[in-house]
Amino acid sequence: MILNCAGKQLDLTHPQVMGILNVTPDSFSDGGQFLAQDAALAQARQMVKDGAAIIDVGGESTRPGAAVVSIEEEISRVVPVIEAIQSEIDIPISIDTSKPDVMRSAIKAGASLINDVQALRVEGALQAAVELEAPICLMHAQGTPQTMQNDPHYDDVVAEVTDFLLERVASCEQAGIDRDKLILDPGFGFGKRAIHNLRLMKHLDKLVKEGLPILVGVSRKSIIGDMLRISVDERLSGSLSLASIAVWQGAKLIRTHDVRATVQAVNLCNHVMQVEDFD
Ligand code: PT1
């Protein structure tokens, strides 16, 4: 499984790390636009040094209860950062958005993978993805970030998430997108209670068996806080633990704030998985 991202290779024959680069006003000290771009570029450089295989740029938070951002605002946040990173860094950049116009602007600026937490369900997004010809991560979410944690319900979360993702794969194929361009993501924390997140993690191997590469994002999420009763800045160990459980079951891409530590956990996991049984 090697994904072609506009000429840059994303090698998913072994598990890799996706570094999170949030370009939201609260992400970097409010010292003006250029300072924010410099800080983003510096963070991208560090993530490459730390072993990230891809950098995920996002201009709209999708955390529970986050505010909606206009198309123009989102483009003005992500495009300068993508241009700056892509001019000096040779790993692929993904654009974390659900908006077709943001996808277009970001790909034009140098992003080469679409990471959509709405799995191309927003009006016009599927068509934009067809035109842009980039690989896509399709994620499951029940509801939108604004309301998704208002009493989410499932009869069988593993089956429902799997069925949803396979339906989105079918829609992509029908629209003319090759399935070998697709990554699947169960969407931890997106319209899921703690027990749903735990069940999805326990049975991640079932989604892996569908044959497409799996991305997992658990970094610092409330699933860890819900179980361990700890604040966001104390969740590194929990994030690494869940990342390891995911990789052990076959996840190929781990989305994280903490690239260096996560690369260590992922690589160690991979060594255990690859070791020969006898001398
Ligand atoms: C994710 C993801 C993402 N998560 C992909 N993209 C976020 N492909 C943004 C919480 O429960 O998992 N996969 N883009 C961040 N969203 C959340 C959701 C952050 C829930 C925090 C929580 O704390």
Image (cartoon, rainbow, N blue to C red):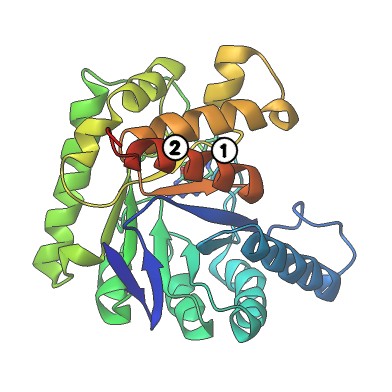
Q: Residue at 36% x, 53% y: name it.
A: 14
Which residue, as the protein is rendered here, is positioned at the far front?
279
x, y percentage for residue 90? 55, 78
Query: What amino acid type should be assigned to the residue bearing mark 2?
Result: Cys
Tell me the quadrant of the picture where the C terminus can be found: top left
Callout in the foreground (1, 2): 2
Which SS class for mark 2?
helix
Which SS class for mark 1?
loop
41 vs 179, left or right, is right
x, y percentage for residue 103? 43, 72
**Circle on res. 219:** 1
Tell me the quadrant of the picture where the N terminus can be found: bottom left
Residue nearest the viewer, comparing 135 with 237 = 237
Residue holding disc 2: 269
Query: What amino acid type should be assigned to the residue bearing mark 1?
Result: Ser
62 vs 181, left or right, is right
Q: Determine if residue 100 is in view.
A: no
Q: Residue at 54% x, 39% y: name it.
A: 265
Precedes in sequence: disc 1 or disc 2: 1
